[in-house]
Image (cartoon, helix red, strand yellow):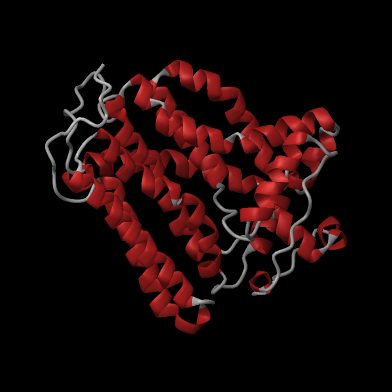
């Protein structure tokens, strides 16, 4: 395999598919900021952030023009992925324009399952061992993203760009939902309404409560290494937003499908963590159980849609790498 990542290659113009998706998201959300106006807090800061995102993309594009090679092309694909941690809390600023809908989802769990699985799960499986297993599963979400995106660089580098495109685009599809669907999740909602209301099966409408309150319940279970890791992660980046559908469940399912198409042994190795991750979203009270089913359903739809989009000439983008053959194309493997 040719490992000279700095060797010059023919330069192709135009944006890569992953860059086009990012630009589309930036422009769409910028338009929303202008439309909602004073209903969104700190619109100037949000618009400035988007300008910086585009500036960073222009810089990676300039590096590629100056030295068109695998390394600079990799940088162009990697940069939009590094922004996922920025876009997630950003959805909170948009969905707070609309009244909170947690009462509907808590009521759905109550009627469908006869209670609140987010509260009873940890009670059914108490103790440090279960707590650490599920918190480990929840935290494994981040290494799963890292492994899925970078694995093609070792297994088959021609799968890297389509894999990166599917991951980025699927995330953006979830974020588009979260912009307009203000559901905070049990960790926030149950703390806000209090245990008495939940035990009585009463789920009041909170209106714009989470626009001014971002306190959440602590994770269940005794102190432990992974529980502490999850709590630190949530304290730094979690917001009362993005509960339905569960992107943890949805995106981990997309990642598993990508791993399966890449090398099936990778998917088999990740399978135990995937199962723990899906269960953990309810165990740690981050999601209602209906959120999990929503994540599973949307994952399959988004995975197929993203592959279809990448197969279109517009999103496939300019390629300096050889066209994938029927043997290794992530699209032809369907």
Q: Position of residue 201 (x, y in %)?
A: 80, 58
* Residue 114 shows in this picture: no
Q: Position of residue 129 (x, y in %)?
A: 80, 28
**Residue situated furthest bottom in the rendering:** 38
Q: Is residue 332 above or below residue 315?
A: above
> Taking the image as drawn, is residue 38 in sight?
yes
* Quadrant occupied by the N terminus: top left
Q: Give the residue displayed 69% in from the left and 43% down from the top.
A: 230
Left or right, residue 209 beside residue 299:
right
Q: 69 or 229: nearer the eye?
A: 69
Which of the 4 quarters of the picture holds residue 313?
top left
Which residue lies at the image location 77% right of the left edge and 65% below the top edge? 192
Residue 52 in the image: above or below residue 218: below
Depth check: give the residue in front, 12 or 282: 12
Measured as percent of width and height from the top left, residue 180 is found at 49, 65
Q: Give the image location of residue 52, x and y in percent.
A: 38, 63
198 left or right, relative to 290: right
């Amino acid at each position: 395999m040719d490992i000279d990542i700095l060797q010059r290659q023919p330069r192709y113009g135009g944006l890569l598919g992953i860059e086009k998706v990012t630009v589309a998201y930036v422009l769409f959300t910028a338009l929303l900021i202008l439309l909602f106006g004073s209903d969104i807090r700190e619109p100037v800061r949000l618009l400035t952030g988007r300008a910086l995102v585009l500036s960073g993309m222009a810089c990676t594009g300039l590096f590629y023009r100056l030295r068109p090679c695998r390394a600079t092309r990799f940088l162009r694909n990697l940069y939009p992925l590094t922004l996922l941690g920025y876009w997630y809390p950003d959805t909170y600023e948009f969905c707070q324009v609309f009244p909170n809908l947690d009462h509907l989802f808590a009521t759905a769990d109550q009627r469908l399952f006869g209670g609140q699985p987010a509260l009873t799960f940890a009670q059914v499986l108490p103790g440090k061992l279960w707590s650490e297993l599920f918190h480990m599963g929840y935290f494994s979400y981040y290494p799963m993203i890292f492994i899925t995106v970078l694995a093609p660089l070792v297994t088959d580098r021609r799968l890297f760009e389509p894999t990166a495109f599917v991951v980025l685009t699927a995330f953006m599809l979830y974020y588009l939902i979260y912009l307009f669907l203000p559901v905070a999740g049990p960790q926030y909602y149950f703390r806000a309404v209090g245990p008495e209301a939940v035990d009585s099966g009463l789920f009041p409408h909170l209106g714009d409560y989470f626009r001014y309150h971002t306190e959440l319940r602590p994770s269940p279970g005794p102190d432990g290494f992974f529980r502490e890791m999850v709590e630190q992660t949530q304290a730094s980046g979690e917001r009362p937003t993005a509960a339905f559908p569960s992107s943890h469940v949805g995106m981990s399912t997309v990642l598993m499908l990508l791993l399966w198409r890449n090398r099936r042994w990778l998917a088999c190795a990740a399978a135990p963590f995937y199962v723990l991750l899906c269960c953990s979203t309810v165990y740690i009270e981050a999601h209602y159980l209906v959120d999990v089913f929503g994540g599973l359903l949307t994952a399959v739809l988004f995975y197929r849609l993203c592959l279809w989009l990448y197969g279109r000439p517009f999103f496939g983008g300019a390629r300096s790498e050889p066209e994938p053959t029927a043997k290794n194309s992530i699209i032809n493997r369907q």
